[in-house]
Image (spheres, grey):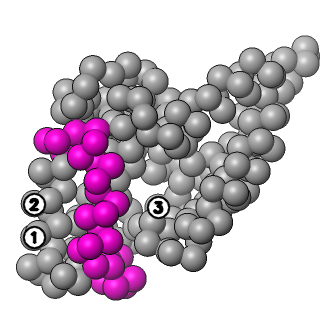
């Protein structure tokens, strides 16, 4: 086996570990926590289906690969809950170290390419990154809504926290932000979100 293929296969097996990184969000039906790989797959499918709602023209294949790789770093860094103020303080440093280790498994050209896509997502400046962030925010919100706000109630999440997070949804899609606003308001009325 040549060295390039060997590195690619090693990376493919390494990212299989993403299936063992569990998030705070539960899958619909509230039977178990969602894992990072499921979250990424769900986001990528959502991006394809909802691309017409992007505020700007986007390269949907780039958005989808962003969705698929954005949490690979959590293999080393762990999942940081969106409303964990202490965890968020160290998230970037943990994820930067993980990005270097994990993507270094690949051949140099692919390492560089995927790190650029990861950084583009993190910087949130391109139309593709803004739309991918919309998916990253909308996906757990949809799951929380489908589960009658169980995770929001469990963690005592406030409407201010959710709205702050959803500003990135608005940057990527005004239409999908309107949907999130409707869902947040419904869950405030139900008592699932602290107002």
Q: CA distance from mark 1 to mark 3?
A: 23 Å
Where in the figure is residue 72, as x and y percent of width and height? 63, 46
Where in the figure is residue 125, as x and y percent of width and height? 42, 34
Inspect the magenta stretch and tell me whether residue 172 lies in it. Answer: yes
Apparent side of residue 54 relative to residue 108 in the rendered image (left or right): left
Which is in the foreground here, disc 1 or disc 3? 1
Contact? badges 1 and 2 (CB < 8 Å): yes
Q: Is residue 139 in view from this perspective?
A: no
Q: Residue furthest top?
A: 2
Q: Residues within 10 Å of mark 3 (few under 14, many from 20)?
A: many
Give the residue number, with chain letter if any, for mark 1: 186
Asked if residue 106 is positioned above or below residue 19 in the image, the reply reads: above
Inspect the magenta stretch and tell me whether residue 191 lies in it. Answer: no
Give the residue number, with chain letter if any, for mark 2: 182
What residue is drawn where x is 45% and y is 66%?
82
Give the residue number, with chain letter if any, for mark 3: 34
Where in the figure is residue 24, as x and y percent of width and height? 47, 70
**Of 149 and 134, which appears nearest the observer?**
134
Where in the figure is residue 115, as x and y percent of width and height? 66, 32
Precedes in sequence: disc 3 or disc 2: 3
Image quarter where the C terminus lies is bottom left
Per the image, label 2 sits on a secondary structure element best described as helix
Apparent side of residue 105 relative to residue 40 in the rendered image (left or right): right
Apparent side of residue 75 relative to residue 44 in the rendered image (left or right): right
What residue is drawn where x is 52% and y is 58%?
35
Q: CA distance from mark 3 to mark 2?
A: 24 Å
Asked if residue 98 is positioned above or below residue 35 in the image, the reply reads: above
Per the image, label 3 sits on a secondary structure element best described as strand
Range of magenta residues:
151-176
């Amino acid at each position: 086996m040549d060295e390039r293929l060997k590195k690619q296969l090693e990376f493919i097996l390494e990212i299989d570990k993403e299936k063992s990184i569990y998030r705070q969000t539960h899958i619909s039906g509230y039977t178990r926590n969602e894992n990072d790989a499921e979250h990424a797959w769900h986001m990528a499918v959502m991006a394809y289906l909802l691309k017409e709602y992007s505020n700007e023209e986007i390269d949907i294949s780039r958005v989808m690969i962003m969705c698929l790789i954005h949490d690979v770093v959590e293999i080393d860094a762990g999942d940081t809950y969106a409303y964990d103020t202490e965890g968020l303080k160290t998230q970037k440093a943990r994820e930067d170290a993980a990005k270097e280790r994990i993507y270094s498994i690949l051949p140099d050209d692919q390492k560089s390419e995927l790190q650029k896509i990861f950084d583009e997502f993190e910087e949130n400046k391109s139309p593709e990154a803004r739309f991918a962030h919309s998916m990253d925010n909308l996906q757990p919100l949809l799951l929380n809504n489908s589960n009658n706000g169980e995770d929001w109630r469990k963690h005592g999440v406030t409407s201010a926290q959710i709205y702050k997070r959803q500003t990135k949804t608005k940057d990527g899609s005004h239409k999908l932000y309107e949907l999130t606003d409707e869902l947040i308001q419904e869950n405030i009325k139900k008592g699932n979100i602290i107002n």
